[in-house]
Amino acid sequence: MPKNASNDRKLVVLEAAQFQALLRALQDGGYSTVAPTLKEGAIVYDEVATVDELPVGKTDEHAGGSYRLKTRKDKAVFGYVVGPHSWKKFLHPPTLRLWQVRRNGNGLEFVHTQEQPPKYAFIGVRPCELSAMQIQDKVFMAGEFADPIYQGRRENAFIVAVNCSQAGGTCFCVSMKTGPKAQSGFDLCLTEVVEKKSHFFVVEIGSDRGAALLQDVPHSEATPEHLQKASAAVEQAASQMGKTLDVSDVKDLLYRNAESPHWEDVARRCLGCANCTMVCPTCFCTTVEEVTDLTGGNAERWRKWDSCFTSDFSYVHGGSIRTSSSARYRHWLTHKLAAWDDQFGSSGCVGCGRCITWCPVGIDITAEVQTIRSSETSKPK
Amino acid sequence: MEKKSTETQSKPKRKPKLAVWKFASCDGCQLSLLDCEDKLLAVAGELEIANFPEASRLVQKGPYDVSLVEGSITTAHDAERIHQIRKMSKVLITIGACATGGGVQALRNFQDVNEFVRIVYASPQYISTLKTSTPIDEHVFVDFELRGCPISKSQLVEVICAFLNGRKPNIPAYSLCVECKRQGVPCVMVSQGIPCLGPVTQAGCGVLCPSYNRGCYGCFGPMERPNVAACCEQWSKLGADNGEIMRVMRTFNAHADEFRKESMRYENASN
Ligand code: SF4
Ligand code: SF4
Ligand code: SF4
Ligand code: SF4
């Protein structure tokens, strides 16, 4: 987990042909290299050994409820945005055994899951995703509910960020001030430049660990021309945002509109399927399940990703508190954009657009906020 | 299954008696129990298998501590028999889409059953059947339902473990999408435009169909509070016609309330 955040970081150039050397250096350093890769019709995050396993020359098209993989005209290594997976699947695993207990004569013997945290190198972390990690850090890294599983994995993680040079149809990081350029929280940050005759990465060094790694990877000094091309690429992404979200006064707006009839309108469309929360890189909720074997001699406690869209989520003795879809959607949206700020001092949304793309019916957080906003101006006070 | 186990902590305890019953069904769900192989021996070690004709000819008289009931009610005789079984069973668990959602045989509920009988049987005069195929819980109180066509072996073992240990079974009622996302399967509906019933189907199958690049067709039946209308609307946006949507609502869980009602809306729309 990189800690440096100096303002005048060093910039160097890595030729695309040397990208494999970067992977190898990380692997030699004992890291499992995790990067974007193809699975069925989507770009997901998984362990990769070589650059050929990355979606070279692929891109993705996003709209509400729709994602399509396409082939690019060039050989860009990172010529797409974010897919259905996020890095939280590695830092905050979807299912995890917390402990086991065995009957031992007349007593009980507890065995806690104490993992040797895996050493991941995350390659291709987008600026919005870095922000999402920083948001989850506030939840898991410190305080009363610090999570040792997350802490161990996060502290070990080496982060190779990638600035976006194009934006997706559901991206709105500019509105959320999380991208398309990474500000902090990486060991190395790449900006990819693909031209007819050249293909290189401008690499920003974000930590001593990043600098040390580069010693084993052939690179050169960045010229002003390199830098100019890299910033043009990022500016291009900033100008292409698929969505915008007006966040001015959004907290009070949502608190004021807890009883808006609009929540019922969303409920007619919302499937209550929970996809939005599962794909969101900041959503952190889990449930625990106790399982026993047939003899009752062994029991285990498992932790699983949960969602505020399920009825068990708000179940207390005798029943569920949020029984309607309108209450659940309102809770989710209000937590993301308002209550999160009260709780953790930031927004709970980084503008990655996943909840819009991966909602099977394309419910759009930016549009729902806008509708609520306009309902205030259109109705007499 | 919220009931407390009747056993006290003091040992040795009497092994709870298990019975397995069959109504209109294909036997697939009962076979899931036989198919539990390694686990089956453990089940036999903890439970007395008192009545399970698929496994053993030995039949012990009731009462039984737990009855697993497969199949739907399609004859007058069965409508009687299920009451007898309920009386003999402390806990009654229905297993599979037939017992919980009427099964494919519930297609008769939408038509005149005598017409089917005339077409299918050479000597229809010997056939005595009800006009409908109905889930067990329309006839007697059911303690717990296990969904699926067939049921999931691991859910079956889980529900038996929960019963033996007097605890709540971990059988979620949320959508299949939750399971799909935890497993990291890219959504076939969003990424390939393949219509999928996952958003209205109860989780539990282990995401069989989307893992093989197919849409779910709802064999685990409706999830808690499903928004079937909005899901079907999305199916039509993805190109499914009214007839196709009506048919997908009428498969293994044809009599499950939310699916049945939606199928009728689409039937009316396509007429
Ligand atoms: S709420 Fe939506 S856009 Fe915001 S971070 Fe979560 S998934 Fe991304
Ligand atoms: S907003 Fe979309 S993804 Fe979220 S629960 Fe509703 S239908 Fe599912
Ligand atoms: S593939 Fe089907 S079950 Fe999986 S997330 Fe998509 S809609 Fe849900
Ligand atoms: S994906 Fe749907 S149809 Fe396929 S096995 Fe699971 S519940 Fe049944």
Image: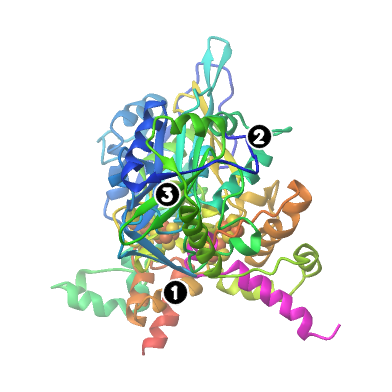
What residue is shown at x 26% (from left), y 54% (from top)? B26
Magenta span:
A354-381
Which dot marks residue A141?
2
Q: Is residue B204 visible?
A: no
Subunit ID for the residue under disc 2: A
Residue extending furthest top? Answer: A105
Which residue lies under the disc numbered 3? A201
For residue B111, above or below residue B195: below
What residue is shown at x 65% (from left), y 68% (from top)? A245
Separation of marks 2 and 3 at Cα, in angstroms: 32 Å
Residue extending furthest front? Answer: A224
Which residue lies under the disc numbered 1? B234
Separation of marks 1 and 3 at Cα, in angstroms: 42 Å
Mark 1 on the same chain as mark 3 = no
Separation of marks 2 and 1 at Cα, in angstroms: 40 Å
For residue A373, above or below residue A32: below
Residue B197 picture location, percent across and down: 41, 64
For residue B32, above or below residue A31: below
User: Ligand 3 quadrant?
Assistant: bottom left
Q: Nearer the viewer, mark 2 or mark 3?
A: 3
* Circle 1: element type: helix
- Amino acid, disc 2: Met
